[in-house]
Amino acid sequence: MKATDWEFKNRALAFGLIFALAFALYSVDRENSTAGLAAWLAVPLGMQADLMARLLFGFAALLLVAAALIRTWASAYLHANVVYAARVKTEWLVADGPYRHVRNPLYLGNVLMAVGMGAMMSRSGFFVVVAMMLMFCYRLILREESELEASQREQYRNYRKAVPRLWPSMRPQIDSSGRAAKWSEGFKAESWVWGFAAGVAAFAITLNNLAFFGALGASLALLWLSSMVLEKKGRA
């Protein structure tokens, strides 16, 4: 079932609530998902649990860097007011950059982000954040697809047949239309995701909760402020 008007308009808030709910599950499950996995892997691999945990947290940070890169690459081909628009923009179809490999690179980045951030959550929180992110992203995708097909018709149907929805193809599936990337816009729009990656990387190095939650809080505040500014500009 596709997302409602409210869900699409407030998707940034919904993403934040998903993370908040998943972190809140520490109240019923106090073991960190990465620490539990590290303890389980350390014995058969003959490694210290602390070292294994640092390596796993480092891998989580790399996943978040990948998520930030993908989202930045995608946003570089869109204006920020399209990425965070309150309604689906159907006036044109972007089919350059990552959109030649996967139809929804921004939501692919969100799923990778959920897995990476899940490393900082409890065991139950990890599964909840990944499952809820997948479910919500698919609802948003179904809404966007229905509106794009209604607007672009045959052009979008051909694009949908050629390019996978969420699992990317290693090779581009369509020819480039020649649209140029605006990398400064991409990094500006996705600076909050880079903040997530920085927070987990800092924790992997220091194992200091304060460093992680400081970066996380600043990133979420930046996302909220950016969304508010873009919404006001859209109204103007």
Image (cartoon, grey):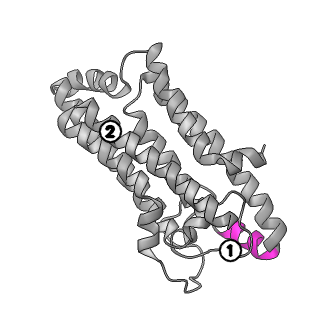
Residue 135 bears which disc, if any?
none
State which region is magenta: 154-162
Q: Is residue 98 visible in the rendered structure shown here?
A: yes
- For residue 196, above or below residue 187: above
Alpha-carbon span between mark 2 and mark 1: 38 Å
Residue 144 location in percent, x, y?
72, 58
Which residue type carries mark 2? Answer: Gly
9 and 26: which one is in front?
9
By secondary structure, the bulk of the magenta-drawn segment is best described as: helix
Residue annotated with mark 2: 214
Which residue is nearer to you in this view: 38 or 203? 203
Q: Is residue 189 left or right of residue 78?
A: left
Q: Which quadrant of the figure contains the N terminus?
A: top right
The residue beneath circle 1 is: 93
Kind of element beneath mark 1: loop
- Horizontal side of 176 relative to 204 (left or right) equals right
Viewer-side label of 2, 1 = 2
Instruction: Where is residue 48? Give x, y as percent.
Output: 15, 25
